[in-house]
Image (tube, helix red, strand yellow):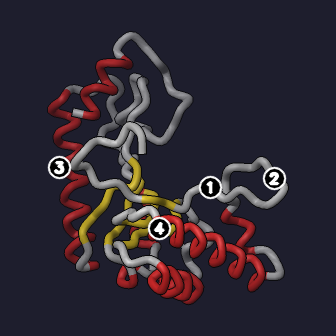
């Protein structure tokens, strides 16, 4: 693939379903709750297993079966069936990406190889925080992640991490509607250091 750095390991993730005849690029996890329930889950399973085939054929060492399926991730038996079906066609490591505040709501970590996290943690309540404030925020989050890793017996994998160029990027890293402000670039850089 063009632009990939030598020596860096890349994975493949099931993020955006494009339904047949549609231009929609994002899977609607609420659809899995609609009737007929079994048909929705079956469609999700076919889609994820199909992407697992692509990941296997492409030699991806890691496959993320989905992320941010807040409404659907509580259906443990169905996810376990999907994970088992993926393992039939894919030999690499498998994870799922949970929102930072919903890690404990995922009941099937034991069936996966890593705990995947969308790491948009708020690090401070201060706009335009100092590097020390950000370090303290990361120390707190690292402690939480170490506890989750110990509890699950799995390593933590950041499926997503990022900070927009905003003064309040460390307060609400997931948001894209914050104040840009005069120090926005410096805040973004400090958050990523």
Q: Earlier in the sequence, mark 2 or mark 1?
A: 1
Which of the image's four quarters has the C terminus?
top left
Q: CA distance from mark 2 to mark 1?
A: 12 Å
How many C-alpha atoms fall within 10 Å of the one at disc 2: few (<14), some, or many (≥20)?
few
Q: CA distance from mark 1 to mark 4?
A: 19 Å
Where residue 96 appears, as percent x and y from the top left, is 44, 68
| Left or right side of 117 for 69 | right
Q: Quadrant of residue 87?
A: bottom left
In the foreground, 119 or 26: 26
Q: CA distance from mark 1 to mark 3?
A: 33 Å
- In the rendering, which numbered label is found on residue 16? 1
According to the picture, the residue beneath numbered tag 4 turns out to be 57
Decide: is 52 above or below 99: below
Q: SS of the residue at dot 4? A: helix
Kindly check if marks 1 and 3 are in contact, taking CB atoms under 8 A apart as contact: no
Q: Residue at x 43, y 66 (%)?
A: 63
Q: Could you tell me if residue 76 is visible in this image? A: no
- In the rendering, which numbered label is found on residue 185? none
In the foreground, 123 or 81: 81
According to the picture, the residue beneath numbered tag 3 turns out to be 139
Q: CA distance from mark 4 to mark 2?
A: 26 Å
Q: Earlier in the sequence, mark 4 or mark 2?
A: 2
């Amino acid at each position: 693939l063009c632009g990939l750095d030598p020596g860096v390991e890349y994975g493949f993730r099931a993020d955006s379903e494009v339904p047949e005849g549609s231009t929609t690029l994002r899977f609607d996890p609420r659809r899995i709750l609609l009737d007929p329930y079994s048909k929705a889950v079956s469609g999700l399973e076919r889609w994820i297993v199909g992407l697992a085939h692509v990941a296997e054929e492409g030699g991806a060492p890691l496959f993320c079966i989905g992320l941010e399926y807040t409404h659907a991730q509580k259906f443990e038996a169905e996810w376990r069936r999907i994970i088992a079906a993926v393992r039939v066609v894919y030999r690499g490591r498998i994870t799922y990406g949970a929102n930072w505040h919903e890690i404990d709501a995922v009941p099937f970590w034991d069936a996966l190889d890593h705990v995947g996290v969308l790491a948009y943690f708020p690090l401070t309540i201060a706009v335009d925080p100092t590097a020390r404030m950000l370090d303290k925020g990361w120390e707190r989050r690292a402690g939480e992640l170490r506890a989750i890793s110990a509890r699950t017996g799995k390593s933590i994998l950041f499926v997503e991490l990022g900070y927009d160029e905003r003064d309040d990027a460390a307060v609400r890293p997931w948001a894209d509607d914050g104040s840009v402000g005069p120090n926005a670039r410096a805040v973004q850089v400090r958050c990523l250091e």
